[in-house]
Amino acid sequence: MLSTSVLAQTPTPPERLKAQADIKALVNDPVALRQAIDAGKKVTFFCVNCHGENGISKMTEVPNLAGQNAAYVLEQIRKFGAGERKNQFMEGLIKVLKDDERLQAAQYYASMPVPPSPTTPALAAKGKALFTKLCVQCHGVNARGSELFPRLAGQQIEYLRLSITRYRDGTGIRNEPRMTIATSMLKDADIIALANYLRQLP
């Protein structure tokens, strides 16, 4: 896995710098932030069918968006809109959103709480050991992610299982060398344990 020092040396794209600045401006203005969150709830009405009310997915293979870092969400929205992330349905929906609506949607989902779900204690314990060894450096001690990496805490088990398996096997659309390296030695049982550990985190 790449070290944090290497990551720090990677230039930040201008569009991500702008997104970070826009989000910071909102966070520093409580009234504007509340307005953005309220507007984001309206903007994301078409997301409910898949990602659920308040960003908690109705389908186990579709990710929760609740609690994600706003800058991370905004960057994924940009990638879908630009065709850098491939999903025909998502690409079509994102392209109709204006810049301010994208920001509002990201801030709305970031503001939503993530209720943890109980899982099998033995699996969660095994998953915690694997997470501490392989994942903490990027996803954080509490698996809540950052501007660069997604929140995994409280995520759907099946979505996690599918995503981790695809990185390990190289069968997914997304290509992330750090994930390929981190998951390369995982067995199916390890992946299930990881998913169970992450699911029960608040």
Image (cartoon, rainbow, N blue to C red):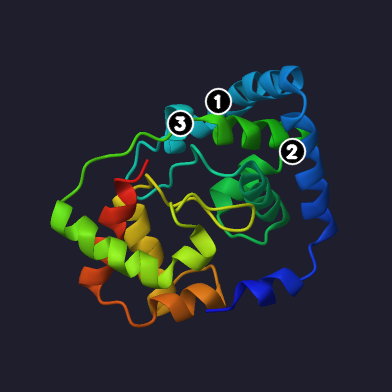
Residue under the image location 47 percent in, 34 percent down: 55
Residue under the image location 81 percent in, 52 percent down: 17
- What amino acid type is highlighted by mark number 3? Pro
In the image, 12 versus 27, the foreground residue is 27
Numbered tag placed on residue 23 in the rendering: 2
In the image, 185 versus 143, the foreground residue is 143
Q: Is residue 125 left or right of residue 32?
A: left
Residue bearing the label numbered 1: 45
Examine the rendered structure and indicate whether residue 202 appears above or below residue 100: below
Q: How many numbered marks appear?
A: 3
* Disc nearer the start of the sequence (3/2): 2
Examine the rendered structure and indicate whether residue 124 appears above or below residue 40: below
- What amino acid type is highlighted by mark number 1? Phe
Provide residue 15's location: percent of width, then percent of height. 81, 53
* Element assignment for label 3: loop
State the CA–CA distance, disc 1 to disc 3.
Answer: 18 Å
Residue bearing the label numbered 3: 113
Mark whose residue sits in front, 1 or 2: 2
Q: Quadrant of the C terminus?
A: top left
Q: Quadrant of residue 74?
A: top right
Graded by Cα atoms within 10 Å as few (under 14), some (14 to 19) or many (20 or more), the crowding at tag 2 reads some
* Disc nearer the start of the sequence (1/3): 1
